[in-house]
Amino acid sequence: MGRDKILIVDDEIHIQELIKFNLENNGYEVLCASDGIEALKTAKKYMPQLILLDVMLPGMDGYDVCKEIRKDNTISNIPIIMITAKGEELDKILGLELGADDYIIKPFSIRELVARVKAVLRRTRIQYIDNVYCFGNVSIDFQKHEILKDDVKIDLTLKEFELLEVLIKNKGRVMTRDFLLDKIWGYEYIGETRTVDVHIRHLRKKVEDDDKNPRYIETIRGIGYRFNLGE
């Protein structure tokens, strides 16, 4: 398997060079872009495994770049870590709601950045074999609508299966409760976020080894849920 490619998007060349040097020292292949348009072109051409995206970019800012990436089916599943000098909670939530997988605030230590890169890559790398997604002791065939745990079939309701499918196909990305409601139950359920919580609780009991300490379906407090690979 080749090295993971990481795209750095930052208009400050010295920041680009600093991050590039350290990521290459950690075994990654690094691409660089200085603005949003260049970032989108580079992402489509080279299909990196991760994008480090600065918010404050000339022209199209990082939030808009993130939105464009998530709208494009060819690159929508690439994980994104937002990098910004902004530290307000609302800025963090905005980035996550737009589809960012993580958020790091300048100034940051290189050790922290590399740790976050490794963590995002780890939790978004699902094993895919013969049209079946595998994680831990669970395998899911979305075409056959079948899920096995320790080679034993698990019975999920339609909504539970759809919920798990959305979480897995957006692996590593925070899914808000409102998004999940709209995606799976439709507009008439908007506001009934307890519906999502109840289904998540049932899903954990069926998929997790310990539903009280879930490895895969993570709660993001005050926002929603994220699917991770666990360790």
Image: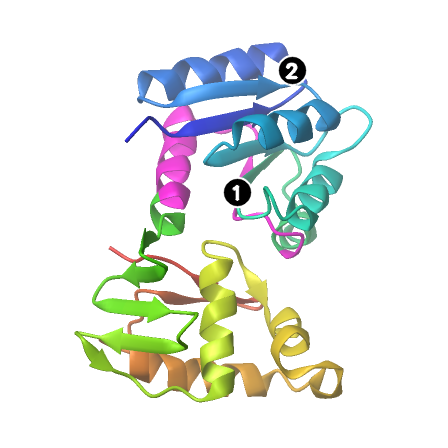
Q: Can residue 212 be seen in this view?
A: no
- The N terminus is located in which quarter? top left
Q: Give the range drawn in magenta.
A: 97-121
Neighbours of disc 2 within 10 Å: few (<14), some (14-19), many (20+): few
Sequence-wise, which precedes: disc 1 or disc 2?
2
Q: Is residue 18 visible?
A: yes
Query: In terms of depth relative to the viewer, which is nearer, 77 or 61?
Result: 77
Q: Mark 1 points at which residue?
A: 78
Q: Which mark is residue 34?
A: none
| Res. 139 image quadrant | bottom left
Distance from Cα at disc 1 to Cα at disc 2: 23 Å
Query: Which amino acid, mark 1?
Result: Ile
Query: Which amino acid, mark 2?
Result: Glu
**Secondary structure under the numbered disc 2 in the rendered image:** loop
Q: Mark 2 points at which residue?
A: 12
- The C terminus is located in which quarter? bottom left
The location of residue 53, given as percent across then percent down, is 60, 33
Determine whether, in the image, residue 106 is placed left or right of residue 26.
Answer: right
Q: Is residue 104 magenta?
A: yes
Residue 212, above or below 222:
below
Colouring rule applied to residues: rainbow
| Res. 106 image quadrant | top right
Nearer the camera: disc 1 or disc 2: 1
Query: In terms of depth relative to the viewer, which is nearer, 208 or 168?
Result: 168
The location of residue 131, given as percent across then percent down, is 37, 59
The location of residue 94, given as percent across then percent down, is 69, 52
Determine whether, in the image, residue 129 is placed left or right of residue 172.
Answer: left
Q: Is residue 83 magenta?
A: no
